[in-house]
Image (cartoon, rainbow, N blue to C red):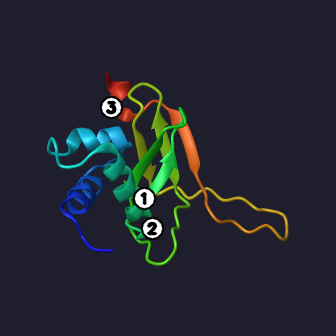
């Protein structure tokens, strides 16, 4: 698939933001009129398919997107995602890798560890 101005702009936003972003968050950061809501969703899905972003479902069921650090042919996101209950930000916590043990014959395809609480910024205020 070819690169587009919208794809490049959305990828830049995802790569330069420390927290996971929803479609509406991305749209708010884009230059006005660059692309519509449907195009943003398509680009975000494409970035996930290209292993440049990963999806996180927050505590409210909203899908957010964060950049991939080291995915090449398969997503590997066995890190913790922290959802602040005050500001509703979702942050990848790479230093924490929760572990679990599944019964035999189960195959893991996707992992989403989500912890909710109060982030450091909200705790200070």
Callout 2: 10 Å neighbours few (<14), some, many (20+)?
some
Answer with the quarter of the image where residue 70 lies.
bottom left
Q: Mark on residue 24?
A: none
Image position of 87 with respect to 4: above or below: above
Which SS class for mark 2? Answer: helix
Callout 1: 10 Å neighbours few (<14), some, many (20+)?
some
Mark 3 or mark 1: whose residue is earlier in sequence: 1
Disc 3 to disc 2, C-alpha distance: 32 Å
Q: Residue furthest right?
A: 104
Please name which of the two marks, 3 or 2, marks the residue nearer to the observer: 2
Mark 3 or mark 2: whose residue is earlier in sequence: 2
Image position of 123 with respect to 54: above or below: above
Disc 1 to disc 2, C-alpha distance: 6 Å
Q: Which residue is tagged 1?
A: 45
Q: Which residue is tagged 2?
A: 49
Which SS class for mark 1? Answer: helix
Q: Which residue is tagged 3?
A: 121
Image position of 40 with respect to 72: above or below: above
Which residue is depicted at the point 30% across and 54% down? 14
From the top left corner, tell me how far across and down residue 27 is, in percent. Answer: 27, 42
Residue 61 falls left or right of residue 19: right
From the top left corner, tell me how far across and down residue 38 is, in percent. Answer: 36, 48
Answer with the quarter of the image where residue 90 lies.
top left
Which SS class for mark 3? Answer: helix
In the rendered structure, are the residues bearing label 1 and label 2 in contact, judged by CB atoms less than 8 Å apart? yes
């Amino acid at each position: 698939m070819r690169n587009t101005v919208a794809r490049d702009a959305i990828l830049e936003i995802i790569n330069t933001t420390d927290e996971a972003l929803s479609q509406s968050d991305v749209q708010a950061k884009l230059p006005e009129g660059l692309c519509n809501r449907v195009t943003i969703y398509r680009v975000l899905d494409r970035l996930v398919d290209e292993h440049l972003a990963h999806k996180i479902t927050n505590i409210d069921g909203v899908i957010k997107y964060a950049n991939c650090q080291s995915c090449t042919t398969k997503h590997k996101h066995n890190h913790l995602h922290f959802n602040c209950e005050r500001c509703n930000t979702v942050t990848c916590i790479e230093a924490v890798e929760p572990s679990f043990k599944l019964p035999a014959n189960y195959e893991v395809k996707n992992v989403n560890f989500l912890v909710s609480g109060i982030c450091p910024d909200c705790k200070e205020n």
